[in-house]
DNA sequence: TAATAAAATAAACACTGTATATTTACAGTG
DNA sequence: CACTGTAAATATACAGTGTTTATTTTATTA
């Protein structure tokens, strides 16, 4: 017998906990996330949180899934703002929205791609749906380039066998794309991610070329390398 | 008045603390670093550590400097193992040693380039010498390519003005190279770093192309893009 | 209304980094 | 040698953390 409706002061405590967590992450960084601090702000006691999340890691996982969803929305909206047949335009839009999201939500970016929580390792099976979806914008465009015979990736290493079941799971969340397109998307993603992660984590020297110019240059060379006749 | 020689059981406690810290980082990860655990293992009390490091962050900074030094040694040794005039060979050697070091010391890699310590931000001025030196292997080869007129980087964005003093400081530790070479090195570094960081932090899907093949492909395309006539 | 089950709290445990006061042990000097 | 000043260790304590257990409150349902 579940107790369906409650008349407590905080209507949806599960969501309120996550909201407060995001607020504190935005203020003090993901590393300083504290259950007791969340409880204090919500004027409840810390163990009450355990009615909604079995432990701190479960809360972090829920936050990561939300972050991936927000990130995926961003990517898909950027893609769909460009004409369906303008594949290069879509590629650019996805690329710029990547950096834009990271700079707008550096803490969420760090939460997903950094390792700011002591001892936390994201459970792949739980995170996969939202993570796969967030990459699907890029993969879809690469796959359309491939279908249109505009994808330039000679000498690209071959896919290692034996992971078909796993890939099918991934496809269930991201869409029915070729695994070759996913591999090419991965290496493009690593380039974008390399630059952005250095920028977000302040590991770029504060001299030389500025971040956004460097990013534009990198986007151009990605397109030059992977899109035929550009 | 310094008390020079001691007959305590632990001769060089400062080094012993760092050694124990590395040992624990290797065992349980950088995030789980604990002064009290270090003290326990050394059979001293936790506040004793404060005689050698003003606080935990200072210890972390010392560890990061050591890690950068180890990383820089790796890079320079890899470079110097190739003939001085074989610039492409040197570039490749540096690139492969980057991934090799990261996979051999994933915890050190995370300590430097991730953000595993809650609330810790590396003090740039203290870390700069070893960090600049660790990048100098790559920058030196790029600069030699530039001097030999073999560096291919048309349309590369121009350097932003106003940071000359800062760059001079950097040069003091890394060597007398052109700032243009540094900028190109940065973007090459970001590509290598993008792939390796995804691999080390387990953020690459366990299907598709395997890490080392992908890395080889990326190295080849870096050389194709930036080295004239290759 | 009484029974039941869910959700909150209270209290405690084992940790953490760090500050303060105190003790111990050594180096230099009379 | 004894004395003294200081460096380095300890003892103790404080405020914070995640988490567990037992207890109480509260809301729903029979």
Image (spheres, coloured by chain):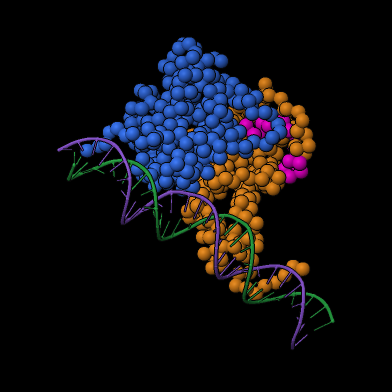
Chain colours: A blue, B orange, C green, D purple
**Image coordinates for residue A45, horizontal then vertical, percent:** 42, 46
* Majority secondary structure of magenta residues: helix
Q: Residue at x 66, y 39 (%)?
A: B138
Q: Residue at x 44, y 14 (%)?
A: A148
**Image coordinates for residue B162, horizontal then vertical, percent:** 77, 30
Q: Residue at x 57, y 23 (%)?
A: A219
Question: Does the segment drawn in magenta span residue B179?
Answer: yes
Determine whether A4 is above or below A34 in the image.
above
Is residue A222 something that shows in the picture?
no
Question: Does the segment drawn in magenta span residue A188?
Answer: no
Query: Looking at the rendering, which quadrant does residue A176 occupy?
Result: top left
Determine whether A138 is above or below C14 in the image.
above
Closer to us: A69 or B174:
A69
Q: Which residues are magenta?
A: B169-187
Query: Looking at the rendering, which quadrant does residue B151 occupy?
Result: top right
**Image coordinates for residue A153, horizontal then vertical, percent:** 49, 24
Left or right? Give the position of A146 relative to D24: right
Left or right? Give the position of B106 relative to A4: right
Viewport quadrant of the N terminus of chain A: top left
Q: Residue at x 36, y 27 (%)?
A: A173
Viewport quadrant of the C terminus of chain A: top right
**Image coordinates for residue B202, horizontal then vertical, percent:** 45, 40
Is residue A42 something that shows in the picture?
yes
Closer to us: B84 or A161:
A161
Q: How many marks?
A: 0
Closer to us: C17 or B152:
C17
């Amino acid at each position: 017998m579940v107790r369906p409706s409650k008349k407590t002061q905080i209507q949806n405590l599960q969501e309120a906990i996550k909201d407060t967590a995001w607020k504190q992450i935005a203020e003090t960084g993901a590393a300083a996330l504290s259950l007791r601090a969340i409880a204090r702000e919500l004027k409840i006691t810390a163990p009450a949180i355990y009615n909604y999340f079995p432990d701190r890691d479960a809360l972090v996982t829920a936050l990561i899934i939300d972050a991936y969803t927000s990130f995926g929305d961003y990517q898909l909206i950027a893609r769909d703002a460009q004409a369906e047949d303008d594949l290069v335009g879509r590629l650019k839009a996805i690329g710029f929205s990547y950096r834009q999201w990271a700079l707008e939500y550096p803490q969420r970016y760090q939460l997903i791609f950094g390792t700011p929580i002591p001892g936390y390792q994201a459970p792949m099976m739980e995170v996969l749906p939202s993570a796969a979806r967030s990459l699907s914008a890029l993969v879809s465009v690469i796959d359309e380039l491939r279908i249109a015979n505009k994808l330039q990736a000679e000498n690209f290493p071959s896919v290692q066998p034996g992971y078909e079941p796993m890939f099918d799971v991934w496809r269930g969340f991201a869409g029915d794309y070729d695994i070759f397109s996913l591999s090419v998307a991965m290496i493009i993603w690593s380039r974008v991610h390399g630059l952005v992660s250095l920028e977000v984590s302040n590991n770029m020297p504060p001299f030389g070329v500025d971040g956004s110019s460097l990013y534009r240059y990198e986007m151009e060379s990605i397109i030059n390398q992977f899109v035929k006749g550009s």
